[in-house]
Image (cartoon, rainbow, N blue to C red):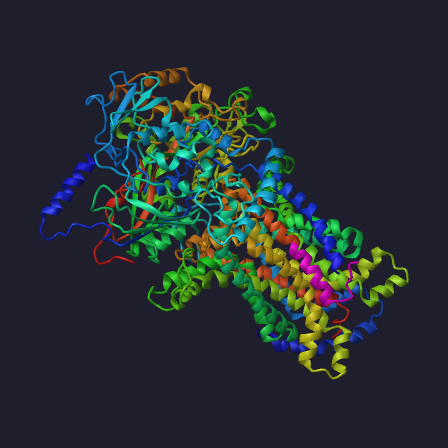
């Protein structure tokens, strides 16, 4: 990429810039340090910028653009991008730009919340299984169980049992949102748990853990301060992949009629619906596709930056 | 009839000195793609269209329906009628005569015993035969002489052409299936995967849910047919990719059930490699308006008689307004193309039964619908843009199965109804659940936990008697019947029930037509059901394939023996 | 280590039985119905009869026990019979002379609802194409993903790294139904049929490799599904490989090794790689059972009709015995590869001890 020389310049400049700073403002918190590091990570800042732009696009965008995503215009089916429709129109004349703006809200929300659930569940179970030998057997069998469950029938059951109670309790949209993110969360935490556990099995035998143990560090502190920071990178990678996975899974669920109603566009669903029109109306696939990829890329770069920022070995390098 | 005219045509061809009469197998190889793969070749074990149509290359029946819904004698010498003495005067029996010289593909003769066995096979109480309704009312099947089969019914049956007619109830070989009666039916895997038939092709290899290889039947009764020597019948993928493989890549010659955006199909056809063919039967895409109250707060009694009437959909004025607001022609243009025609009837065909009394609905009239509602005093009283009826806002939940075309239709209808001041919430449900009928699921079409639902229904064959009986008062789906029942919208009228009873006792065809039309009009004018589209089958074939006469009344491959390829374009 | 493996294997048995019961309950509870795909012209009474003949309405525990008996006793014995006998079975399914008949030929087997034929026969005919396509694509994914991950970690923020990041993130975030369709449009539709780079859009499962030409055809029909799946797998593996390598490249032992004058190749490929493999081994072990499970979407896009396609058809058709059996075999593989991964951890990092 083109920003390689700049990056080199930054990594060259940081030690000189950062070190005196730390000296001069002595009582700085760890988080300020991390932010400082993050701020100097070009990829991370580019990712952050891109991510914030996407967020603005989907939140402020509809308000500025003012076109109803559900408005149909059957005389303008499959219209190519133009001033009136900067991203073209869809099969019933819906404006693609309004659709991706509106759809992005749901996709982003589902992607991020489901990622958080996946990471929380996966890390929790992975840490417990990896650290406490007594829990390892039972938790890993649980993981095996979830890995082996056939997902589609499981979803049908969950949706049959919980869709209506949730819709009544929280309203249709909020109910489905809760259902979606929990369904995606509970069907995708297993790889994270296995990866975290695998790493912890190795880390907890290292000398520094032994040292921490020998001075009587309680397990909670040991896990939070000594072990978790060392498994951060696979967790970050899992998080990035989980966002992509959640956006796509949501679309597959909605496509099957298990998720949001059909008049609720989401990026993934626009993409699924549009694939058959690839030749007729390429703009229908390009814009949602690019937005999904951009989101995942920017989350990835932010994750990279965050990992570097939180790793004391790299900090100040 | 159709068949004789074809023979005449063949004879005429033979007279022309230059025209080389097609020889059996001279057209080489044929590739067919069904994007849903057949899982067995025994249509009695699986009632799915894909299984019935793939089996129709091998298994045949006494008579078939051509593209116009006319019966064509197939294994029979002629069509029995009251006039020719084949059907008894009291309408309780029908006697079919097997045409001369018909043998199974293994060389043995087709005898009445095979038909008797087929009936026993399908009516065995433990067999779970999917086509059992073809033999409804049949009390015995017996041999008369060595080439006649007499079917006796328990009651006078004005339309006796159900057993052994059409692709749904073909004859199977007694010798092959002898050990496969009742509970043993599934154990006969070899027979179910490779039935011996009388048809133009024999099964070489069958891979369930994947591919079937056929080759020409050397014992086929017509020495010049089939035109193709071998057929590969592939399954899998989806409708768009099936269309693509015929119209764009040319890997296949015939693709079935191309229910895809008509624009895409038209674009593909315009490339010039394929022709799209359609055939219309009795399928109608319709809206059912729930006549009972589906309010979730009623819990388990919703959408049943105990829940009481629907707060507003029982009022025909509202139903009429809903219907008037719909532009059926646009729905066809956007979603169906050549595979659909706007209709205002539940019973659109055959010709005899099609009413013309309701055709006003063919033109969209939103101002008229608004005026209608205004006149009836159904107006927006609280200024939220939604009309109220007796204080209840007109908000409807509109559900259907998951299918791209249906979701587009939903979106359009939602927009039109919004113009009337009616708020619509959309829902789509996976077809395996929606049509699954699981009494534990709240999302089946029978439970109808919604205000309006949309799907397609039709009837097999050409006689609507059983179909019109769907709307009897006591055929409501309800908890006592495990939610089974065909009267989905919970329509009930004593007058209608009387017409159903009258039709069951009427033999005169014209009179039956009048009764069926009257019932259709009564249903449609109650506005508990809103017919939208008369749907046809849509298939595509390579331009080099000739002789396709697509029929929606039978298997669309019913005349595959007559298919050929333009000489010089054969494939290996 | 050996006692540990034996203990785990013994413990796996009750775990698997429990898993199989949960799978069974979920599939049974699911609201899909075996008669849902039939035309609506088939009346409700007939549907009920079909369900009756399938045994759908029998008591749940009885159904489970019957499945378990066939799964754990009949089917293994039949497989053993076939393994011990070189001649094919007679038409009535009994064994030819000279072969050991362990179960009577009319013993009931696990029968699929849709095809009414033994589930294991269906698996046997679908497995080869799944292994060919999904298996090779997975190997390709590993072969591309691991070196890519190593290089992009070693040359962090270099052009190669940025390119690899872009490639893998796009590869992971664009679903296979889209990449697959694009590949078909480019290589099957836009490419003239007689060009050498034209590829068939539909996988021929009956194709037999017997000479060079048929092998070339086999390759041709595998290229597109393999690339689509391989891209996805490579993306995932390279991300984990890179992250883990980055962690280890910063460790003190790397500095020590370099200080001792070890060659850069030895340091990276021997010390760092070995210590970085744990998460990668986990990911690979997680995904190998999935190779057996097939690729639901890719198989459908290219009509590969392997296990994944059979499974989705079975789920659609509420074919309980089929879903149940495939899921169970999948569960066995999951448990097995989980164990293999644990053993590999011990080999990669001898400090990890389980006893």
Whether C337 is among the magenta residues is yes
Q: Nearer the viewer, residue C274 or B363?
A: C274
Q: Is residue B165 left or right of residue B325?
A: left
Image position of B431 with respect to A301: above or below: above
The C terminus of chain C appears in which quarter of the rendering?
A: bottom right
Q: Is residue B127 visible?
A: no
Q: Is residue A167 left or right of residue B118?
A: right
* Residue C255 at x, y percent in the picture: 76, 78
The N terminus of chain C appears in which quarter of the rendering?
A: bottom right
Q: Nearer the viewer, residue B530 or C28?
A: C28
* Residue B46 at x, y percent in the picture: 43, 37
Image position of B465 with respect to B69: above or below: above
Classified by dominant secondary structure, the portion drawn in magenta counts as helix
In the displayed orientation, state which residue is furthest to the right: A215
* Residue C143 at x, y percent in the picture: 57, 68
- Residue B108 position by quadrant: top left
* Residue B554 at x, y percent in the picture: 31, 36
Q: Is residue B252 visible?
A: yes
In the displayed orientation, state which residue is furthest to the bottom: C261
In the image, which residues are magenta?
Answer: C336-355
Whether B409 is among the magenta residues is no
Residue at point 39%, 36% (across, down):
B177
Image position of B53 with respect to B446: above or below: below
Tag count: 0
């Amino acid at each position: 990429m083109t920003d390689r020389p700049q990056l080199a310049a930054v990594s060259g400049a940081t030690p000189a810039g950062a070190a005196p700073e730390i000296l001069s403002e002595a009582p700085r918190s760890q988080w300020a340090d991390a932010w400082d590091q993050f701020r100097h990570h070009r990829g991370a800042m580019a990712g952050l910028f891109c991510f914030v732009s996407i967020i603005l696009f989907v939140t402020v965008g509809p308000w500025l653009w003012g076109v109803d995503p559900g408005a149909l215009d059957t005389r303008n089916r499959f219209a190519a991008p133009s001033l009136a429709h900067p991203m073209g129109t869809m099969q019933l004349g819906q404006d693609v730009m309004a659709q991706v703006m509106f759809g992005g809200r749901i996709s982003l929300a589902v992607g991020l919340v489901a990622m958080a659930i996946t990471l929380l569940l996966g890390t929790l179970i992975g840490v417990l299984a990896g650290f406490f030998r007594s829990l390892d057997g039972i938790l890993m069998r649980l993981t095996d169980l979830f890995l082996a469950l056939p997902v589609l029938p499981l979803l049908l059951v969950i949706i049959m049992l919980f869709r209506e109670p949730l819709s009544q309790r929280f309203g249709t949209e909020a109910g489905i949102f809760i259902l979606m993110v929990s369904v995606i969360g509970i069907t995708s935490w297993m790889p994270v748990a296995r990866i975290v556990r695998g790493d912890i099995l190795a880390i907890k035998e290292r000398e520094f853990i032994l040292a921490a143990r020998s001075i009587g560090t309680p397990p909670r502190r040991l896990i939070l301060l000594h072990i978790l920071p060392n498994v951060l990178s696979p967790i970050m990678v899992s998080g990035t992949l989980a966002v992509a996975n959640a956006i796509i899974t949501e679309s597959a669920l909605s496509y099957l009629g298990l998720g949001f109603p059909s008049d609720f566009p989401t990026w993934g669903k626009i993409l699924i619906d549009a694939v058959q029109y690839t030749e007729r109306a390429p703009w229908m696939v390009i814009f949602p596709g690019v937005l999904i990829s951009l989101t995942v890329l920017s989350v990835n770069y932010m994750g990279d930056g965050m990992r570097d920022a939180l790793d004391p070995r790299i900090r100040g390098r | 009839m159709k068949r004789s005219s074809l023979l005449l045509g063949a004879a005429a061809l033979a007279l022309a000195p230059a025209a080389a009469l097609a020889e059996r197998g001279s057209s080489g190889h044929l590739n067919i793609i069904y994007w849903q793969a057949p899982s067995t070749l025994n249509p009695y074990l699986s009632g799915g269209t894909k299984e019935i149509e793939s089996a129709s290359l091998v298994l045949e029946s006494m008579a078939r329906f051509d593209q116009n819904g006319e019966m064509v004698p197939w294994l029979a010498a002629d069509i029995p009628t009251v006039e020719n003495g084949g059907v008894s005067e009291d309408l309780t029996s029908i006697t079919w005569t097997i045409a001369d010289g018909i043998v199974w593909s293994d060389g043995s003769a087709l005898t009445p015993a095979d038909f008797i066995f087929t009936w026993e096979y399908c009516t065995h109480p433990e067999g779970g035969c999917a086509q059992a309704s073809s033999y409804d009312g049949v009390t015995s099947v017996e041999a008369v002489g060595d080439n006649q089969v007499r079917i006796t019914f328990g009651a006078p049956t004005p339309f006796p052409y159900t057993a052994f007619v059409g692709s749904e109830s073909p004859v199977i070989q007694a010798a092959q299936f002898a050990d496969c009666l009742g509970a043993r039916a599934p154990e006969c895997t070899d027979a179910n995967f490779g039935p011996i038939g009388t048809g133009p092709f024999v099964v070489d290899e069958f891979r369930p849910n994947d591919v079937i290889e056929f080759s020409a039947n050397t014992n086929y009764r017509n020495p010049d047919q089939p035109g193709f020597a071998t057929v590969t019948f592939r399954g899998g993928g989806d409708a768009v990719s099936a269309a693509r493989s015929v119209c764009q890549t040319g890997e296949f010659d015939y693709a079935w059930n191309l229910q895809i955006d008509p624009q895409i199909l038209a674009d593909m056809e315009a490339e010039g490699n394929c022709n799209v063919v359609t055939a219309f039967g009795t399928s109608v895409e319709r809206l059912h308006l729930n006549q009972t109250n589906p309010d979730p707060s009623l819990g388990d009694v919703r959408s049943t008689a105990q829940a009481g009437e629907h707060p507003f959909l029982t009022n025909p004025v509202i139903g009429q307004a809903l219907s008037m607001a719909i532009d059926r022609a646009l729905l066809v243009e956007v979603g169906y193309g050549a595979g659909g025609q706007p209709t205002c009837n539940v019973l659109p065909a055959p010709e005899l039964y099609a009413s013309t009394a309701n055709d006003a609905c063919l033109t969209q009239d939103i101002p008229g619908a608004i005026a209608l509602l205004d006149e009836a005093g159904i107006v927006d009283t609280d200024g939220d843009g939604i009309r109220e009826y007796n204080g209840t806002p007109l908000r409807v939940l509109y559900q259907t199965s998951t299918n791209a075309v249906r979701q587009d239709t939903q979106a359009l209808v939602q927009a039109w109804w919004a113009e009337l001041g009616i708020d619509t919430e959309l829902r789509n449900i996976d077809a395996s659940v929606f049509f699954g009928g699981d009494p534990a699921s709240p999302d089946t079409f029978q439970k109808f936990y919604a205000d309006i639902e949309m799907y397609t229904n039709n009837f097999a064959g050409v006689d609507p008697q059983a179909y019109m009986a769907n709307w009897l008062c006591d055929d409501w789906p309800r908890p006592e019947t495990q939610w089974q029942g065909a009267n989905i919208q919970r329509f009930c009228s004593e007058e209608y029930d009387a017409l159903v009873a009258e039709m069951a006792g009427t033999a005169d065809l014209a009179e039956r037509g009048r009764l069926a039309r009257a019932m259709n009009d009564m249903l449609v004018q109650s506005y508990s059901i809103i017919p939208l589209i008369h749907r046809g089958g849509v298939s595509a074939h390579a331009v080099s394939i000739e002789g396709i006469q697509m029929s929606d009344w039978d298997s669309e491959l019913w005349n595959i023996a007559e298919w050929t390829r333009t000489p010089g374009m054969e494939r290996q | 280590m050996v006692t540990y493996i034996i203990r785990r294997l013994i413990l796996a048995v009750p775990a698997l039985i429990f898993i199989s019961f949960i799978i069974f309950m979920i599939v049974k509870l699911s609201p899909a119905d075996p008669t849902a795909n039939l035309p609506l012209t088939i009346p409700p009474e007939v549907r009920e009869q079909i369900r009756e003949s399938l045994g759908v309405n029998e008591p749940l525990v009885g159904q489970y026990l019957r499945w378990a008996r066939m799964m754990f006793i009949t089917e293994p014995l039949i497989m053993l019979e076939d393994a011990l006998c070189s001649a094919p079975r007679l038409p009535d399914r009994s064994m030819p002379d000279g072969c050991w008949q362990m179960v009577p030929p009319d013993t009931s087997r696990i029968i699929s609802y849709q095809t009414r034929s033994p589930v294991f026969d269906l698996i046997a005919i679908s497995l080869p194409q799944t292994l060919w396509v999904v298996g090779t694509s997975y190997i390709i994914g590993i072969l591309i993903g691991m070196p890519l991950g190593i290089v992009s970690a070693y040359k962090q923020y270099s052009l190669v790294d940025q390119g690899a990041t872009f490639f893998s993130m796009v590869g992971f975030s664009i679903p296979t139904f889209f990449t697959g369709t694009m590949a078909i449009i480019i290589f099957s539709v836009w490419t003239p049929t007689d060009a050498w780079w034209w590829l068939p859009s539909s996988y021929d499962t009956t194709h037999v490799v017997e000479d060079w030409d048929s092998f070339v055809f086999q390759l041709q029909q595998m290229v597109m599904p393999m690339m689509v799946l391989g891209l996805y797998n490579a993306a995932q593996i390279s991300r984990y490989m890179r992250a883990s390598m980055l962690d280890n490249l910063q460790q003190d032992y790397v500095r020590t090794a370099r200080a001792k004058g070890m060659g850069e190749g030895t340091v990276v490929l021997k010390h760092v790689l070995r210590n970085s493999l744990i998460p990668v081994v986990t990911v690979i072990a997680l995904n190998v059972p999935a190779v057996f499970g097939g690729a639901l979407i890719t198989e459908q896009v290219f009509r590969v009709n392997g296990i994944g396609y059979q499974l989705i058809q079975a789920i659609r058709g509420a074919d309980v015995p089929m879903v149940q059996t495939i899921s169970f075999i999948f569960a066995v593989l999951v448990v097995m590869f989980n164990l293999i991964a644990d053993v590999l951890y011990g080999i990669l990092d001898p400090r990890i001890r389980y006893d």
